[in-house]
Structure formats: C-alpha cells, structure tokens
Image (cartoon, rainbow, N blue to C red):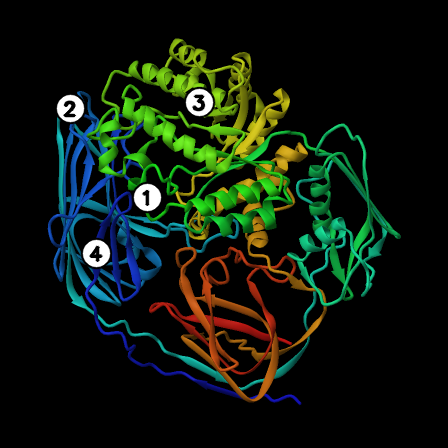
Amino acid sequence: MNHFSWVISFFLSINVLIAQSTNAHLIPKKGLVLENQGIKWGNGSELNFFNSDKSKHHYYFTWWEQDMDSSQQDVDKLLIGSENTAVSGFYQLRKSKQLFEIDINCQWNRLDSGLVDIVHNKWWFPFIENATFESPQGVFSFRELKDFSGSSLIIHTSWGSYEIKSSHPFSLVKQVEIPVPADQFSRRDQYLLLEERNIPILPGGTIKRFFSIRELKANTVISNNSTISSSSIEPVKNAWQAPFQEFPEVLPKPKELVFHKGFYVFPEMENAILNETQKEFLKIISSKWQWDKKYAPQINTRKIPLGHEEAYKIQVENTGIFIDYETEKGLQHALYTLQQLTVAQNGKLQILLLSLSDQPSTDWRGIHLFTGPTSLNFHKQQFEKILLPLKVNKVVVQCEQAEWKSFPNIHNPISISLNDLKASFDFFNKNRVEPIPLIQSLGHMEWFFKSKENRFMAVNPAYPYTLNPTLESSKLAILNIWDEAISLLKPKTIHVGFDEIGMIGFNEPREKEIDYWNIQMGLLDSLTKARKLNLMIWGDMGLAPSEGPDACNGITSERARKIRSSIPKGTWVADWHYLNNADPSVYLPNLKIWKENGNIPLASTWFYPQNIKGFVSAAQKVGAGVLQTTWADFESSEYNMLQNMEQFGAYILALDYAWSGRNELPEKLPYHPIEKWGQLYYNHPLPIYSMAGTNILNDKKGALIHNFRWENKKAISVSGFSLAIKTDRILPEGTPVIKISYMNEGTEKSILLRYGVEIRGERDERPIFDNIPGKGKNIWHHFLPKSISLNQLTIESIHPLVLFKMNQFHFLE
C-alpha cells in the first residue's frame, strides 16, 4: 500500500549555542587559527623570506620548523630562524578575551637585499561571503575587495563583528574559485587573504609588523532551523541494481586483452571443496561484491616459463578460467586482474570470455609513503583495494618518526608504534611487496631535533637540520636507530635519505657539505655491507643544474662529480625531478649520468601528470625503475589524504604507466586518476542482487533545511541507504557536516557525512569521492552489515553555518 503524507514545517529558532568569544592560536608551520562556535574561519598565516628575484626561499614558514615559546600565559610565541642564518626573530600572539595582538619582529641577517611576503590571516571565504565590510571610508562591497588597501578594517559576520588593525597597509586578495569545476580536485583553498607582498628588505634590515583583531561583538549564530518532517513510504522498484560494465576497465592496462562473445557464469556449488587458488580469488573479489550463495569458479592454473617472473596469461572460456604464470607474483597479479574483470548481472557473478597476456614494462615499481598512529589500517586499505590490483612491487616507508626504543625523546603525536610498524612490513612482505625503510640520516633531521636534548648533535644547534657526522654521539645515534630498525624489520634495502642536506640552518661554507656527505656515506656504506643490505639514497645532491631538469643541488658540475664519486657502485638512487613536462628527453641526461656512475636510478616523480608520463617513459627507455613520491604532510592518515588527493591519484597514474608502458598523455586517458582513487578507496562490497526500496522523500523543490525527520508507524526492513544531498556552502575537505541517526535494537546509531567524501556543496561540481561508477557522481550509497527494522530516522546539519538540500532518500530493502 502506498502511504504518502507530507508535513513540511519551516520555522526559525535561536540556536542553543550561547554567544562565545573567538579562540585564537598560533601553531608552528600553520600560523594564526581563529575559531568560534565550531566555525573555523581563520585558517593560518605565513611569513616568507626570499632573495631579491624570488627565485629562492630563505625562510619558508609552512615547511620550516619553529619552536614554540609558551612560557608566558596567554602568549603563543614562535621562534623564527636563528641569528647565524638568513632570518631570526619571533612571531607572537598575545591573547585576551576580546583582543588578539600579533607582533612580528625579524632580522634579515644576509648581506644582500631580499623580499618578504606576509599573509596575516586566511579567512574561509564561504563563511564570510554574506559579511559586511567597513573601512574608514565607509562600507564597501565584495566587488570592491580587490581595491582595498589599508591598515584598518571592520568585518560583520554572523558570529561576531571584528576590527582589524595593522601597523602597515595590507590588501584583501580572493583565492577563490566558485563554482568549483568538476575536475579541480586540487582546489582546496577558498580563502580571502589579508596580505602584504614583495616587501623590500635591505642588508641587515628588519621587518616589524603589529597586527590586531579586536572582537567588537560576539553573536550567537542563528541557524535557520527549517525542518522537513515526513512519514512517506513510497515503494521504489529496482532501487538498487548492481552496476554493470560489459567491457570492464583493467588497470594497469594489459599488454593484450581480447574480449570474446559470451560470459563464464560462476557455478553455484553448495558442497564444493575449494582449492587454495579458488579461496584466494573469492577472498579478493569479496572486497568488490557481496553475495549469499557458495560459488565455485573453475580455475585451472599452470606454472610455466613466460619470460618474466611477473608475467601471466588468462583465458576465460565457457568451461572456466585458465591461468598461466611463472611465479607466485604472476599468479597474484592474475587474480587481481580477474577481480577487476568480474561483473554482476542478473544476480550472478560472471566474467566475459576473453584472452589476456600481460607482463610489466618496468621491473621496479614503487611508491613512497609516511607512517603514523593510524597508518597500519590506512595502508592496508590502500593496498588491498587499489595498490595490489595496480601491481605495485616496492614500497619506501619513511618511518624515522617511529617510537624507537633507543630514542624515546623523539616520540611525538604522529609516531607509529613499533608493533604497528612491524605489522606493516609483515603485511607488505606477505603480499609480495618489498618494504624499504627510509630514515633520514644526514639532512632533513628535523624529526630527530624536535627534542632539544639532541640538538647538540646538529651542524647548527641554533637552527638544527643537518646532523654533524663528525661527532661520535651523532654516529652512535644513527647506528643505534638503524640497528633497531634492521633487527625489527629485516629489510633487504635501506633508504638513508641524503637529500637537500644543507638547505636549512647550514651556517658553514657550502663545501663542508661534501665533507659531511663523505663521512656519513662511508658510515652507512659500511653498515649496509656488514649487514649484507642494499643502499638507497635521494639523488639531488649528485647533480648540477646543467645535468637535470630541476632538483639539482650539486651546485656545480665539479662539485656534483665529487659527490657522485663517493657513492658506492650499485647504490639505488631515487632521482627525483618534479618538472611538469611529458617529454622523456628532458629526463634522459640525469638517468644516464647515474647509470654511468655505476648506480641504479629510479625515476622519482610527484603528482604532476605530465611529470609522471614523461619521466616514466624516460625510465623505460633506459631500463630504470619508477618511484612515485608523496609529500602529503609527514603523517600518513586519511585526513591528510583528503587534503592531498591529487598526490594519491598520482599513484594510479604512475603505476599504470610503469606497468603498461601505455602511450596516451594523461588528459587522454579513459579515467580521471583522482576520481578513480576516491572510488576505489571508499569502495565497499556491493550487493549483486536487485533490491526494492522505499522513497521517504522526493522534494523536487529542494528546500534548504537544517533538519529532516522521518517517522512512520510501519517499520521497514532496511539493508542500506541511497541519498542525494547538497550543502549550501563549500567546506574544507573531510569536514564532518551531516549526521544521520536511527535506532537499532534499542541503541542509537549514527553516521557522519564528511564534505568531499559523502557530500558536496551546491556550487561544487566535483563528484563525491565515495561514489559508485554508473550510479550518479553525487549519490551516496551505504550498505549495512545486516538488515535492520526502522520506523524513524533523522538527518541534521552539525555545522552551525550549513544548511542542506536533499532531493532523494531511499531505503534499500
């Protein structure tokens, strides 16, 4: 019976939030953060120093470390640089209930002139686009923001009014792109910047600024608490059907794939005894599909020479699946390829009849990643859902910030436990991926010097970055950590860093870099030889600017040759260059230099698509390996992934090109790597059977609301949800914004929807990451572990400034 009744009530009510003063904090490498009633409206600040033509940083605020001095109550003080480097001084926030005062006082210690950029604050534009602005000349509009240049400003927002004063004129600059285009996944910043740019600074000069934010009035945020109430239970036929693609896309692209007419339908055999290959295959496809019958696909395997240890062949016929492989690696690749080829149709699992032959174009195919407190499960999900099907076979794990027993004073909030680190390496090895620990052992030693106890071991203890290898204590420190790592992880290869060794805080003549390099290289070469391990380093220090496209820190050809001469033959060199150029010839000179030096180069790319295409192609021309690097902060976590999705989509691009050797430019590929990463990472097993449903809302007008309530006397059996919803504001990626609540067996259950993952804004044309191909790029599906009985459900905005528009909500039965 079709019951259809609507009760729509719109009302305004004062939110229970009490008017609050804004909280302010100064955070190292982040800057000034402002928050009020759950509204994070100030998202950082910056103070950067350059040479006179801005071709080089002399201080990079968001990348270079700052100590925090919290010795005074209500004062956050960041210490900038050191007196024996290019910049020294402080950046201070003094806090009172209604007043925040920023004091910048820095000395330029160089003998040449430079330029300074200051971003006093980054306001999240979608929160203030309805604000009113005043200058001493009067009220001005948003269109006039670009013309503002002054030292005084008042802004009236829904949560309060603020007076901004500065000792020097600043400008308002919109770093905004609204609406956000469908393919602009790297567009995370929607800021109004309060900034000063290109401030000249003379030799020995100072930069002083005073900047204040006074809260004139704190408002209680008044939410438009419009509510839609519904008791509708309108039946929907075929509310869920498994997505079907007759010719599934396989990544990496196989060398040969020919589809034939017809399907091999998996037989259902309740009492079948499965062999290990069948069990492993069904386990692999269970991450993609869910079913309730016992399948016994016929899989015939044959281990034969195929000319490459990772090669495999697949023949799918009416009678079953036939796999040829040379080693277990090839068999694993074949099973993951079959997972991608398995489809659901008419409630049955099946594979199109086909012939496939495949082997890699690049033997060494790796990715680089960091660790963190949650990285074990985070990495497992990435590998099981994406990276193993993409046939990765190496992983460089930057793990220096682990909880090493030899140095408990370096443990910090982003440290991985040794148990989790060991479990990670065991997981990689079990899945035939060689894990390579990376512990920076000369430059980039910020991780080691976070503890002031260790700073005496730095080349410059006043601004510690480079380890002083002439000290016996430094030698013992590195050897102790590496001994611990090698004993725990049992690697075949270790990566010791050695990039940009004098980039920060190096207050000695640059030629001393070579001396320190030689000492530490000798130490670690001896370690690897004694432990029968392979050695890996970054390559930038061994190239002069004339010898590569970028990232050449050898300074001169003669100096670079000296550095290369100290690198042991057979050392793996992660030759990183990030120029966004698809021409392979650009990268051939540096790869050839390393091969001529007796080293083994790895073309090490970043997230730029043309860089990946060109550098991988160059590597294949000279028989080099490929390493896709990732610099999504120094903690590997889902949150940081969402802030840097272009770097994770790049994994797909690099591994596809490295294995397949395909020729298309990135923009001509049949997939978008970032969207593909989101779909695969958030993929959950999909039911292979059709499901009826119940529509509890079909608001064609799409009213903006704060709450939705559904209740019906008749309980409904529910196996999942299908939801089409949009917010009225664009939010930072990963922000929790909507809560769905329901009762199950007397217990309240809730699901949080995060911006970018399950929901986006009306003016954000990008698809949600958790979308199912072919099922709508902004429709979110959620399947429950088992069916439950529901007769009430609520959906509410949990962000004080956000309303939502819901056009569809189906219960899947």
- For the residue carrying disc 3, how many other residues have a C-alpha within 10 Å: few (<14), some (14-19), or many (20+)? some
Mark 2 and 1 residues: CB-CB less than 8 Å, in contact?
no
Mark 3 and 1 residues: CB-CB less than 8 Å, in contact?
no
Residue placed under numbered mark 4 in the picture: 24
**N-term-proximal mark, 4 vs 3:** 4
Residue 655 lies, with reference to residue 320, above or below; the image says above
Identify which amino acid the numbered label 1 is placed on.
Answer: His
**N-term-proximal mark, 2 vs 3:** 2
Identify which amino acid the numbered label 4 is placed on.
Answer: Ala
Q: The residue tagged with tag 2: helix, strand or loop?
A: loop
Residue 326 lies, with reference to residue 744, above or below; the image says above
Residue placed under numbered mark 1 in the picture: 411
Say which quadrant the C terminus sits in.
bottom right
Which residue is painted at 39% across and 37% down in the image? 400
Q: The residue tagged with tag 1: helix, strand or loop?
A: loop
Mark 1 and 4 residues: CB-CB less than 8 Å, in contact?
no
Q: The residue tagged with tag 4: helix, strand or loop?
A: strand
Say which quadrant the N terminus sits in.
bottom right
Residue placed under numbered mark 3 in the picture: 527
Identify which amino acid the numbered label 2 is placed on.
Answer: Pro
Q: CA distance from mark 1 to mark 4?
A: 27 Å
Q: Nearer the viewer, residue 308 or 159?
A: 308
Mark 2 and 3 residues: CB-CB less than 8 Å, in contact?
no
Mark 4 and 3 residues: CB-CB less than 8 Å, in contact?
no
- State which mark lies toward you, 2 or 3: 3
Task: Measuring from the top left, give residue 367's x and y in whole percent.
Answer: 53, 37
Where, by quadrant of the figure, is residue 363 drawn? top right
Residue placed under numbered mark 2 in the picture: 203
Q: CA distance from mark 3 to mark 1?
A: 25 Å
Looking at the image, residue 601 sits to the left or right of residue 161; the answer is right
Query: Could one spot residue 248 in this view of the protein?
Result: no
